[in-house]
Amino acid sequence: MIAIFNSGGPVMVPLLVCSLLSLTVIFERAIFWTMVSMRANQRLVNGVMELCQAGDWEGVRKTAAGSKSYVIRILISGILHREYSLVKAMEAAAADEISHMRRYMGVLDTIITVAPLLGIFGTVLGIISSFDMLGSGIDHPEAVTKGIAQALITTASGLGIAIFTVFPFNYFNACIERAARFIEKYATSLEIVYEKLADKNGSGRESRHES
């Protein structure tokens, strides 16, 4: 590997940096989504929704205490601010959660774009070096082959880094989209439940006032 790295020329240095950044972000995001999966508790979410349907807000607070589920955090944010704006509170909390989920995704996206370009740049440098050697004669053919090797190594390295990065990048994006759908589903459900409770309480107050 060291010999290949040295044969690739100076462009191999930024390519190495790209590969290390990619590995670091992929490892960090893999741990993040593993923790998200471990903290998910569908039974708790369903239990909270049932308590919301009954209007038992105190029960919701006790049941959801200490939960690290992102869905629960968003629902609790809406419930705590229900007297002001339940929907806006959940939208703000959801935006924060999605922002955490998208953290460092821009780094992977940039590496996918930049790594092949760096590989092409190294290829151009290698070809220029080879033609420069040819222009001065072919007394040293190994110098020409060195330039060609540099061109091929950098291209292969750049493409390899991009290919290695694109699969985790797409997987993490799919996880974000799936989480966004879950958030929308339960936030909408809570909004409907709260509106029904408000209408019911309003109708009850009107009936008592008429009597």
Image: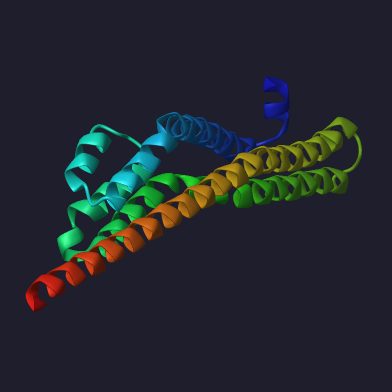
Q: In the image, is residue 196 above or below residue 143?
A: below
Which quadrant holds residue 42? top left
Query: In percent of the image, x 41 and y 35: which residue is there?
Result: 43
Pick the residue in front: 50 or 122: 50
Give the percent coordinates (x, y) of residue 15. Answer: 61, 38
Is residue 6 left or right of 149 when viewed as pictured? left
Residue 41 visible in the shown view: no
Query: In percent of the image, x 67 and y 21: which residue is there?
Result: 2
Quadrant of the rendering where the N terminus is positioned: top right
Which quadrant holds residue 22? top right
Question: How many numbered markers are drawn?
Answer: 0
Quadrant of the rendering where the C terminus is positioned: bottom left
Pick the residue in front: 26 or 211: 211
- Pick out the residue farthest to the front: 211
Query: In percent of the image, x 39 and y 60: which residue is there?
Result: 188
Give the percent coordinates (x, y) of residue 87. Answer: 29, 63
Is residue 38 left or right of 194 when viewed as pictured? right
Give the percent coordinates (x, y) of residue 45. Answer: 38, 41
